[in-house]
Amino acid sequence: MLSQYILIIGFLLSFSTIDSEVLTIEKIREDYMHYATDKKKCESAIESLANVENKNSLQLGYYGALQTIWANHASNPIGKLNTFIKGKKNIEKAIAEDNDNTELRFIRLSIQTNAPYFLNYRSNIEEDKSFIIKRKNEIQSISLRNNINALLKE
């Protein structure tokens, strides 16, 4: 009987480990370039970040990015626009909290570079690109460095 309880507890813990993995910034970095094409992966990451209370600036920045990316997956035009606006606000709030964060600048650059012109969210492209180029050698995360190189096409 005791061995059955241990087995059940171990089984349940394995699910909580998988779920918490989605919340790690490194996992989000690894999957970042796939969110635009993988609706389920994007939705799962949004749900995970939505459940984080008191998000730090980096979590808020990625949450905003995922919201803007989700606009690609939404079918209702009003829903697309509202989701994009919420995401944009979260990105800008994150950068206001931590203006010197290279990763947040990367997030904004990646969204602004890919945003349609009519959304009028392209005003920081050159500023962020220059900021990132000056600081990219300081980046420790291989996933983030790869994402930046892919975005800058280096």
Image (cartoon, rainbow, N blue to C red):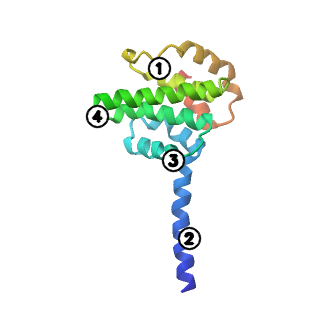
Q: Which residue is mark 4?
A: 75
Q: Position of residue 34 (x, y in %)?
A: 45, 37
Question: Distance from label 3 to label 2 (Cα)?
Answer: 24 Å
Question: Taking 18 as reference, is 82 left or right?
Answer: left
Read off the residue under disc 1: 113
**Amino acid marked by disc 3:** Asn
Read off the residue under disc 2: 10
Circle 2 packing at 10 Å, graded few (<14), some (14-19), many (20+), is few
Secondary structure beneath label 2: helix
Amino acid type, mark 1:
Thr
Q: CA distance from mark 4 to mark 3?
A: 24 Å
The residue that label 3 is drawn on is: 51
The image shows residue 121, relative to residue 41, as above or below, that is above
Q: Relative to 54, is 102 above or below?
A: above
User: CB under 8 Å between callouts 4 and 1?
Assistant: no
Q: CA distance from mark 1 to mark 3?
A: 28 Å
Secondary structure of the residue carrying tag 1 is: helix
